[in-house]
């Protein structure tokens, strides 16, 4: 997973990647001004449904707060993976729907 982190940070300036300390998953994010945008998240299949994604995102929220961010955003792509699971997880973590366009739902959470 470290190679993906290095790839992101080299290829997309300003993009960062948080890797779970036990290599169970990762999330990429970008901080711009008051906003921290979680771009992509991944958990290995055997670790899903264990509330680990919430833990992963909480670590990024702590980084965002330290950086002066006032809110978090993230997107759910309706046509990929399991969007219902993603929406439920985000709602449980305090995110609300900000907007929707085509197959993308933008979620937001105040910090």
Image: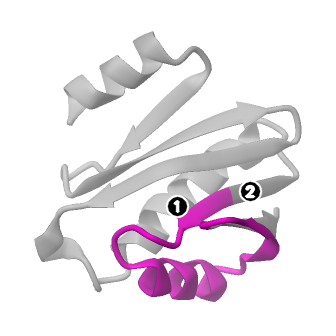
> Which of the pair 46/63 is nearer the observer?
46
> Secondary structure under badge 1?
helix
Give the residue displayed 48% in from the left and 77% down from the top: 86
Q: Is residue 48 above or below residue 72?
A: below
Kindly check if marks 1 and 2 are in contact, taking CB atoms under 8 A apart as contact: yes
Residue 47 sits in which quadrant? bottom left
Report the residue marked by disc 1: 57
> Which of the pair 59/37 is nearer the observer?
37
Give the mark nearer the N terminus: 1 vs 2: 1
Give the residue displayed 34% in from the left and 71% down from the top: 81
Describe residue 18's horizontal placement relative to residue 48 as left or right.
Answer: right
Give the residue displayed 42% in from the left and 41% down from the top: 18
Q: Is residue 83 above or below residue 67?
A: below
Q: Which residues are magenta?
A: 74-103
Q: Is residue 41 above or below residue 32?
A: below
Report the residue marked by disc 2: 72
Describe residue 2's horizontal placement relative to residue 84 as left or right.
Answer: left
> Secondary structure under badge 2?
strand
Q: Assess whether residue 106 is covered by the magenta stretch.
A: no
In this view, which residue lies farthest toward the left? Answer: 46
Q: Assess whether residue 99 is covered by the magenta stretch.
A: yes
Residue 25 lies, in percent from the top left, at 27, 55
User: Which of the image's four quarters has the C terminus?
Assistant: bottom right
């Amino acid at each position: 997973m470290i190679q993906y982190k290095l790839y992101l940070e080299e290829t997309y300036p300003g993009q960062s990647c948080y890797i779970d300390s036990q290599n169970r998953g990762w999330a990429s994010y970008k901080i711009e001004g008051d906003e921290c945008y979680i771009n992509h998240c991944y958990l290995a299949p055997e670790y899903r449904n264990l509330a680990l994604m919430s833990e992963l995102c909480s670590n990024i929220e702590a980084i965002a707060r330290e950086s002066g961010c006032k809110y978090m955003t993230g997107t759910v792509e309706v046509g990929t993976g399991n969007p219902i699971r993603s929406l439920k997880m985000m709602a449980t973590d305090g995110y609300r729907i900000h907007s929707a366009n085509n197959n993308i739902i933008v979620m937001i959470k105040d910090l």
